[in-house]
Amino acid sequence: MKGFLSFVRKEFRHIFRDKRTILIVLVMPVVQIILFGFAISTEVHDARVDIVGNWSDPSVHRIAGRIGQNPYLSVVSVYETVADVPERFRKGQADVAVCFERDFDARLRHEGRAEVRLLSDASDPNTAQMIVNYVNGVLTDAQSDLMLKDRPEPASETSFPYIQYMYNPSVLSAYNFVPGVMGLILMLVCSMMTAISIVREKEYGTMELLLVSPVRPMSVIVSKAVPYLVLSVVNLVTILLLARWVLDVPMRGSLLLLLLVSVLFILASLGLGLLISVIASTQKTALLISGMGLTMPTMIFSGIIFPCESMPVILQYFSDIIPAKWYIIIVKKVMIEGVGWGYIYQEFLVLLAMTVYLLPVSIRLFRNRL
Amino acid sequence: MDKDNKVIVVHELTKKFGNFTAVDHISFEVHHGEIFGFLGANGAGKTTAMKILCGLSLPTSGGGTVNGFDLCREQEKIKRNIGYMSQKFSLYADLKVWENIRLFGGIYGLSSKVIREKTESMLHNLNMTDLRNELVGDLPLGWKQKLAFSIALIHEPGIVFLDEPTGGVDPETRRLFWEMIYETASHGTTIFVTTHYMDEAEYCDRVSIMVDGVIADLDAPAILKERYQAADMDAVFRQLAQKAKRQ
């Protein structure tokens, strides 16, 4: 026991003495959360809208005014010919053009219908989709107002869906990123740092020294893991505090449940870290394997950036073997939707199965290699 | 008396990796307080044999005792009672001098009080009292080596294994290091040392030379030189190592 404590103390010293390690372990999570929360957001602010039509047409005027009032949209230019639109897009002066047909107001009043066309510069499809949705929303509102004015009692067939974003009313991307970053950080700290710290001992030859000492291999592994476990919990708390008080992401579910799941995920990550330390013989290799083999797939396949549902089926299957994916799903459910045990047990079981498989296998491999 | 006098007894020790016999039925004894040189070209099986003696791996057949503990059944006890220092410099460079001492004291289960006393006397003997708060990585190699040797002895083991302890060290530092070895042996600690420097082999009480997994010869350097009619141990070693068939 005394040997074990000396060991844990030594590991903490290694961490706190190396500025780069401490930077990765304690500063990076904060930076990532801030970055993802503020700088990298998928929301669109101030999309530039062109109005193509007759500016003296009262209906056009009214609808353009409504578009201008929308906080996400701003009208940048008004002109009369559709032919000018491509040039505007090419020069990057507008994101979307709303084209009203000739005599818009008159047709609307006499025939009860008039045409509007949306032209979008869809070179960035995600943004284009979002902007079009915003504009569409404004147009739909305007349309329903017109109907109400004409017929005080709206007919059932002309009713429009009223959209409510249940768990994320203002559709903030932080709601998606915070769980994602949590998964990424815990994975990084636990797997990469544990792997590197073990491989470093192999590389420097100090591992030999530990092996001839009476300390059991199991103690070596556990004492390597303990500091990173502690730091991960610190990170977790930091991220949650930042999310709650800086990014306004709610913590709707049980904190205890979230912590439990996080510890499980940390254990799975430690297992992966051990596995890497068995394969790699130098710190560089360990870094490369964890970067390319863990961080990248986690970024791409865990649904942080790209939704898994829109991937080809075979990649969807591949994404299933990434522990972070399941962890992130659970975190979203618990944090954002505030659901309890009953709604997450399936994902929890998957994660548990992974951990129960990874940990003993990697420990056995690790001991065999010694 | 004769039996108590033997710190290492090895009988027909063999280690096979698949079809490859790394160590082939070797038998030898090392006496109390002896400086025993364990020589051999790279790949002759020294490291494998040494690993078994340190309790790191199990022999395929044969056996023996180290400090009276069985090689096959009492590996934990062996580890507790031996010191070890390897060719790769074996302390933590990013820990301070006193932290390294503390760590290994803790690993071998010494109490805090004993560790404190040991630290003081060790730093005093090494003339390193002023350097206690230095990072070990900042020390010159010679100092590191001396410190590593002292730390390998912190739990007062009956025998200490030195695996090419003077690799990459200048001749003067090597000479000082061997003085420490003599000093330690004179207090009754057995020294089991591997080396590639044949002048160091001359300093040993007895030397064994491994070739192709077997012990080609074992005796005092003076007797070996006479037997092979060689001027120095270097010539003895080359005569024996020439017979090696595997590379």
Image: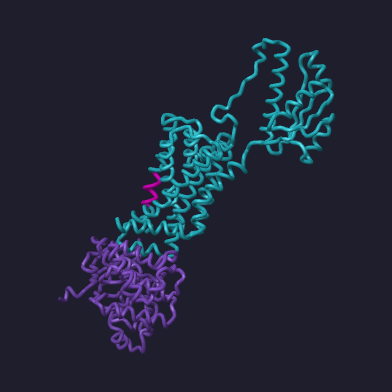
Chain colours: A cyan, B purple
Q: Is residue A368 magenta?
A: no
Q: Measured from the top left, where is residue B235 in percent x and y?
A: 38, 85
Q: Which residues are magenta?
A: A357-364
In the rendered structure, the answer to whether residue A287 lies left or right of residue B35 reads right
Q: Pinpoint residue B244: horizontal percent, then vertical percent.
A: 38, 76
- B120 sits left or right of A277 in the view: left
Q: Quadrant of residue A67?
A: top right
Quadrant where the image shows the N terminus of chain A: bottom left
Residue A211 position by quadrant: bottom left
Can residue B59 be seen in the rendering of this structure? Answer: no
Q: Is residue B200 above or below residue A209?
A: below
- Whether residue B3 is visible, yes or no, is yes
| Location of residue B30 with respect to B91 vertically, above or below | below
Image coords of residue A260 (percent x, y): 40, 39
Residue at the (34%, 84%) spot, across then down: B202
Residue A33, located in which quarter of the rendered image? top right
